[in-house]
Amino acid sequence: MNADKIHQRSIPQTTTLLKTSNNVSINNFNLKKTNNSTTTWGSLADASFLQWTTSDVFGLFKYHPVPCFFAVSLLFFMGVEYTLRMIPPSSPPFDIGFVATAYLHRVLVASPTLNTVLAGLNTVFVGMQTTYIIGTWVIEGRPRATVAALFMFTCRGILGYSTQLPLPEGFLGSGADFPVGNVSFFLFYSGHVAGSVIASFDMKRMHRWELAFLFDTLNLLQVVRLLSTRGHYTIDLAVGVGAGMLFDSLAGKYMKKAMAEGGDVLYTNLPHLS
């Protein structure tokens, strides 16, 4: 028996032994087969679940609480989806963010001046995002955030044009809002939110924690304002967060691939590559 194993059973192992840096085995639930396992779909007698024990089941909840939470959530929302009545075509969409910000919406309806001031402040924040994202390339020589923003806005344009959502009922427009001039814009998804996420991720990579916290706080306030003015549906804002994360990751992969192929023409300051 190897000294580095905590224990070993006589029956086929149903746990995955994860090696740490000190070569110490950790008992864990069999979410992933070991390299030595060669189970095929044709052999049901060797199916993994037939070898599960009570300790395996409880180990799942102990070592993997996040997947367990998502499993419970799946069952819950399956029940919700099967029991909810669908919104008829003649009715406006239901949006829980609009319900949560109903009071703020009434305040802004009663005070057009306040709505204009907040719109102007939001436009300033969009300008801050744009300046930072472009500045990381043209000033610091780190184009990842710029590439991410280009990817993100191109995809937003394609999706926004492909399915054009109706303007939310009660929309409070302002000439001071971005895009300035009270012009048309794509609802899905929010470029305001996605751009802020891209900028914030770059700040965190560069350990600019205070600036990243400021951007995250302003982004949250931006979300509340956009819901209060009915400038975006909740799904637009939620997907905007995911889009910022996704395109930041894709831009990172693209830049690494470009560097590996000798495509460093975008870089002017290689020691600060991110």
Image (cartoon, rainbow, N blue to C red):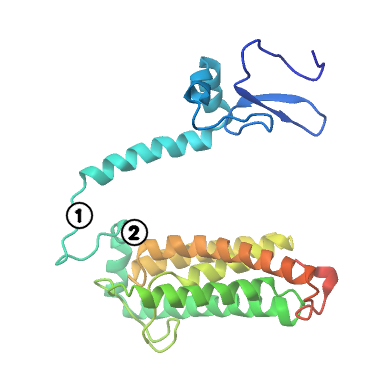
Quadrant of the rendered image containing residue 229: bottom left
Q: Which image quarter holds the N terminus? A: top right
x, y percent for residue 121: 49, 77
Which of the two residues, 101 or 46, is positioned nearer the viewer here? 46
Rendered view: 84 above or below 274: above
Mark 2 — residue?
Answer: 97
Q: Residue furthest right?
A: 271
Local crowd at mark 1 within 10 Å, few (<14), some, or many (≥20)?
Answer: few
Instruction: Name the residue located 51 percent from the left edge and 60 percent from the top edge.
Output: 242
Decide if residue 114 is in sight here: no
Horizontally, is 3 left or right of 218 in the view?
right
Rendered view: 15 above or below 209: above
Q: Which mark is residue 86?
A: 1
Distance Cα–Cα, label 2 vs label 1: 18 Å
Instruction: Name the residue located 70 percent from the left edge and 25 percent from the top edge.
Output: 26
Secondary structure under the numbered disc 1 in the rendered image: loop
Instruction: Name the residue located 64 percent from the left edge and 76 percent from the top edge.
Output: 146
Residue type at mark 1 is Met
